Image (cartoon, rainbow, N blue to C red):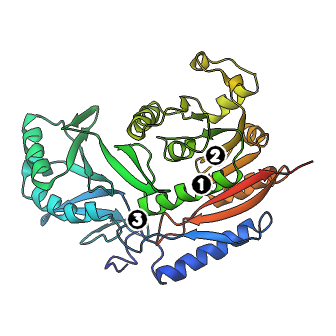
Amino acid sequence: MKCKHFGECGSCSLYGKSYPAQLAEKMGRLSGMLEPFYRGAITPFPSPDAHYRARAEYKIFHDEAGCHYAMRHLDKKRFVTLEECPMVAEPIAKRMWKLMERIDADDELSRRLFGIEFLSATTDEVLVTMLYHRKLDEAWEERARALQEALGLWIIGRSRKQKVVLEREYVTEALEVAGRTWHYRHYEQSFTQPNPFVNRGMIAWAMTQAHRYGRGDFCELYAGAGNFTIPLSTLFEKTIATEISKRSIKAALENCELNGIDNITFVRMSSEEFTEALEGKRAFTRLKNVDLSSYDIGTVLVDPPRAGLDEGTRRLISKFDTILYISCNPETLTRDLETLSKTHRVMDAALFDQFAYTPHMEAGVILVKMKN
């Protein structure tokens, strides 16, 4: 990827080496981190070197020349106005500059606009959220609807205590994995995987490991909108999944319907609460229609936040035969492996380069319980 803003724009902090060289450096770092637990091959899942980000957020900078997209400078003290942004997915790239041109020419759309967020899918759908420091009225809605129709996208307007959805608040993704197309509704301002190309590889890798090492019924903690849960559920008779966000649970149920999946029970609980429920420490009304004793959980997938797993969750999953651990922070992954490796052996590992041109990397490991 070539970008005239390398060295200034803070969104891409690695730019002095070619993308293959950056990926090789990350592979070396991850290999060193996992060495105490695993010395086998690590499978890399590289990103395309351009047009890979399905989500993007920009500040809007106003000056005498008009409106501009802006990103924080590498020094974190100022902003850089952008003339290009080749990291964004093609559906965003082909619309974002036309969008800004029309906004800049329309006082109703540009007035007190301070941010724009994009969410896209490989299906060419794009959702645009426009953020304002003013109340949005009928005049804004009329102009926004015209803009929406002209550019073939959907628009949401937000200001303090106000949200205006002109037509829809999600895009529908379609990912081909394991010989099947999986459909997902990705909602505005909800968590979604940012790189659909690497995400496809993540799901495929997890399905391969679950097929090879999976036992019993399947459980997923931190399930989100079902990104992993739905495809992996087809490898098991019964699946139970937890997620704390109401909105993500709603999307997960819709995604089950989109994909014709009916063997998943989604429970709105944190991993800590689910641990207490499985261990019989607390009774939850949210589980009144769920018979936990009917599940013979043998395989668990965890995809925790950057903080990794809490002590109770580590203790819980160490009881299961097979652990699939997807990590957005290899440092906390290795911390958790210090505990999990006492009962389980790492059988395989992968690097998922969701954030090309940054030091950030994600990883996956599959652990199988050691026999006494």
Structural crowding at the residue carrying mark 1, measured as other residues with C-alpha within 10 Å and reported as few (<14), some (14–19) or many (≥20): many
Which disc is residue 206 wearing? 1
The residue sitting at 54% across, 30% down in the picture is 266
Above or below: residue 212 compared with residue 188: below
Which disc is residue 301 wearing? 2
Q: Which of marks 3 and 1 is nearer the N terminus?
A: 3
Question: Of the residues tagged 1 and 2, which is closer to the observer?
Answer: 1
Amino acid type, residue under disc 2 in the picture: Leu
User: What is the distance, in whole Å, between disc 2 and disc 3 at their CAs?
Assistant: 40 Å
Amino acid type, residue under disc 3 in the picture: Lys
Q: Which residue is the site of mark 3? A: 77
Residue 56 shown left or right of residue 244 in the figure? left
Above or below: residue 242 compared with residue 188: above
Q: Tell me whether the residue at label 1 lies in contact with that at label 2, contact meaning CB atoms closer than 8 angstroms.
A: yes
Viewer-nearest residue: 151 or 14: 151
The residue sitting at 74% across, 54% down in the picture is 367
Instruction: Spot the residue most to the right.
Output: 372
User: What is the distance, in whole Å, between disc 3 and disc 1 at their CAs?
Assistant: 40 Å
Residue 193 shown left or right of residue 109 in the figure? right
Q: Earlier in the sequence, mark 1 or mark 2?
A: 1
Q: Where is residue 353 in the image (x, y as percent from the top left)?
A: 52, 66
Asked which secondary structure carries label 3, the reply is loop
Q: Where is residue 256 in the image (x, y as percent from the top left)?
A: 44, 36
